[in-house]
Image: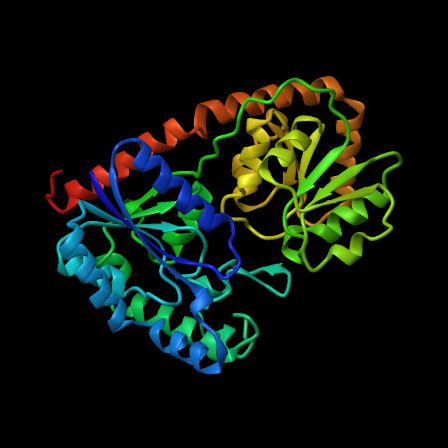
Amino acid sequence: MRVLVVHNAYQQRGGEDAVVLNEVTMLRAKGHDVHLHLLSNEKISGWMGRFRAACAAVFSIASYRRISVIIDGFKPDVVHVHNFFPLMSPAVFYACARKRVPSIFTLHNYRIVCPTALLMHDGVVTERSLREGPWWAVSQGVYRGSWLGTAALATMISVHRRIGTWSRRVTRFIALTGFAASKFAAAGIPGERISVKSNFVDVPLQSDRDRSGFLFAGRLSPEKGVEVLVDAVKLLDGALVKIAGGGPLEGRLSGAPGLIPLGVLGADAMYREMASSQALILPSVWYEGFPMVLVEAYACGLPVIASRLGAMAELVDDGVTGLLFDPGSADDLARKMRWAMEHPEAMARMGRAARARYEAEYTQEINYSQLVAIYRDAMDAVGRTE
């Protein structure tokens, strides 16, 4: 199969960029011919660069022409789009439709329905964009504090909803969780075209180790619930939480009792910490897209204590692969952490169940089968064969 993968990479490489490269590597290893068309936001510099990007975000003629030329030369069976904002725009899908090539769009975040991309504002989950549309966000400058950037996003969302881009030009969508699929369907994305496919991680089986303490792994920012975790640890005697990550709230951890800063860790070091911890703490106060750290924890046999919110409530089987607590509640998080400390055998059972869940749902082989099935379904939808 010939697959054209399209992605607008971020200035600071994140989980979404890693997912794209992982899928491309996987497809090539399976013998597929993959062409990766990658643009980077690093090209955006200065006021004029930001202005041009804002203008192109709604519909980029240059992107339409560029993708058309690539399709003519590469002749893909399918085009898989991960992120088109801001340099490519939804023009990518019009080029695919014009060339009669099926397009698949992975919905890594909520950008096509909400300018915040997170369904969150001022530290609080909000579905205002689903109810009212995106224009409320412009005066708030929710995109990087810029009214211009936010206005460009709001225009993109409104225009493409009105002209039917998502219902008429995209062959299939991939949502990362059933929760996300329901939100997109509520926003008007055709539910019958949405397939649920998680991301995968390829983690070597970790050797058995003595497990103790808790682990937080992620960006130290407000939406990740760092404040909730800090307050919860204050309520516990003898709790130790290793903190792997960096971000704007690093200073909040300085000198805090019970917290052990590790800094940003590489993959191998992270897996070692996961293999020696009793539970991963995931206290996010936003819905999350698909928290890769959760699946990495499962792969390491590490149960997860997470907010009962969004994707986390779907991915953590309460009492089986981990524990859920009331979102934003330091008191409830402290209760669940205390219970974990008092019941090491139960936590060990949850860790084994977490590893079994990883092997059943989140391996590369399972993900590959799901992805190829979606590609073939998209090809069938437009009457195309390999």
Residue 196 visible here: no
Q: Quadrant of residue 371?
A: top left
- In the picture, measured across the screen, residue 324 lies left or right of residue 204, that is right
Farthest residue, direction bottom = 48
Q: Position of residue 246 (x, y in %)?
A: 68, 52
Residue drawn at (43%, 69%) of the image: 43
Residue 371 visible here: yes
Residue drawn at (68%, 43%) of the image: 326
When the figure is inspected, residue 125 is found, relative to residue 47, above or below; the finding is: above
Residue drawn at (40%, 76%) of the image: 54
- In the picture, measured across the screen, residue 352 lies left or right of residue 73, that is right
- In the picture, measured across the screen, residue 153 lies left or right of residue 70, that is right
Residue drawn at (44%, 42%) of the image: 177
| Depth order, front residue of 95/35 | 35
When the figure is inspected, residue 198 is found, relative to residue 223, above or below; the finding is: above
Indicate the quadrant containing the N terminus: top left, top right, bottom left or bottom right: top left
Q: Quadrant of residue 383?
A: top left
| Depth order, front residue of 301/178 | 301
Indicate the quadrant containing the C terminus: top left, top right, bottom left or bottom right: top left
Q: Position of residue 204 (x, y in %)?
A: 53, 25
- In the picture, measured across the screen, residue 134 lies left or right of residue 169, that is right
When the figure is inspected, residue 336 is found, relative to residue 68, above or below; the finding is: above
Q: Position of residue 277 (x, y in %)?
A: 71, 29
